[in-house]
Image (tube, grey):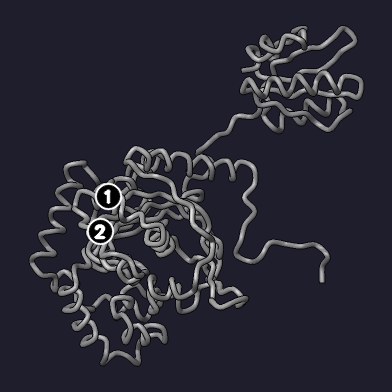
Amino acid sequence: MSNIFTKPRGTQDMLYDKARSYNKIVDILNSVATNYGASPIQIPMYEESRLFKRGVGNSTDIVMKETFDLANKGDHDYSLRPEFTAGIMRAIIENKLYASPDLPLKLYYSGSIFRYERPQQGRYREPHQWGIEFTDLNLDDSTVAEAILVMVDGLKALGIDPIIKLNNLGGDISRSNYRKALVDYFTPLKDKLCTDCQKRLELNPLRILDCKVPEDHELVLKAPLLKDYLIDEDKKKFAKLLELLDSCNVKYTLDDKLVRGLDYYTGPVFEAYEANHLELGALGGGGRYDKLMETLGGPAFNGVGFSFGLDRLLLTLGDTYKFEGPNLMVVVSEEDKKELFNLKHELRNLGISVLSPTEGKKLNGALKMADRLKVKNILFKTPEGYQLKNLVTREQKAIDINNTQEIAELVK
């Protein structure tokens, strides 16, 4: 057994420019959400296991086989969060945020989730998500449309041309009618379904439509269509939503088989894709949920939300974000360490990014390091005094290290 520790399978070390890109993406998305009046929220990485079983749904892959369950150390069973929505609903209920007079309640979040699934490119066991949750006592079509617009505007702000896939799951009556139709269709075919879908047939037949097993996919293609079982009221609500999206020139397409992977969705569900690269898969998805908060012991609030897979966004964007190096490298020796240490501190307080190589590093080595790190300027000592060299223009001049303001102006 090796003495060198390595990261767990399905996780990643996000280094340097990739970590900077991650932070940049989150900052951009936070700014878009703020423009829609949303506020940030942070919740625990783990919750009671029963929260996810009740909220996410027992028929989902997440609950059936993908949660990371913690060793029992008390009176409760805990799981690392496999998604954010159930935990955010718990936070809203526990902190009575629903009692705010300022509705709808709009929240945005980012962070890790944990799912025990097969790792592959862009998919990890500790993926990162950014998302929103909008809730209200009577959630109107405008708020649902705004949630979709946050998705659209967020991707546009990242330089991605988005197209939205939409479906209408309808209300209780429509889904009950459709559930019966699916049971009638799939029951004679039960032996041809995968083991998971045989369980889904009993628990939530709609989840069969989301199955990734190729043999099941052939059966799904011939299954009844949800739109044929929607009551008029659900059709009218969905039509109003589409009108709002049309008014904002949102590019979308309707997909009868889109159901999403969580049991709590009702009404409209949606996913975002890069318009010219649909084959890359969904960049994010979400939908409306009318019963979730009540199911978790709260008031009968409605909600809508979505999340982006930040790892998928990083993969899609590649090296879109080019990061500039530090403003200044200061080469330090033992004899001038004290005065240069203070200079660096003062420059940083003026907003200048400053770094130094290992103390005593030769100038030639420092210049190579500066080139690798894309540093713009370097300050070093010669027998004639201190010199400041612009590594872009190659200009060099003598400098007074006591004139902090002048140095700051020169290296900006």
Residue 155 appears in the picture as rendered: no
Q: Which residue is mark 2?
A: 166
Q: Looking at the image, which is closer to me, 220 or 330?
A: 330
State left or right for residue 87 relative to residue 221.
right
Kind of residue sitting beneath label 2? Leu
State left or right for residue 283 relative to residue 152.
right
Q: Residue at x 63, y 12 (%)?
A: 409
Q: Looking at the image, which is closer to me, 202 or 343?
A: 343
Q: Given this view, does label 2 or label 1 mark the residue nearer the observer?
A: 1
State left or right for residue 236 relative to residue 300.
left
Rendering coords of residue 335 (x, y %)? 91, 20
Q: Looking at the image, which is closer to me, 106 or 27?
A: 106
Q: Which residue is mark 1?
A: 104
Q: Residue at x 72, y 9 (%)?
A: 403
State left or right for residue 350 relative to residue 273.
right
The numbered mark at residue 82 is none
Rendering coords of residue 185 (x, y %)? 22, 86
Q: Residue at x 31, y 74 (%)?
A: 209
Q: Earlier in the sequence, mark 2 or mark 1?
A: 1
Q: Secondary structure at mark 2?
A: strand
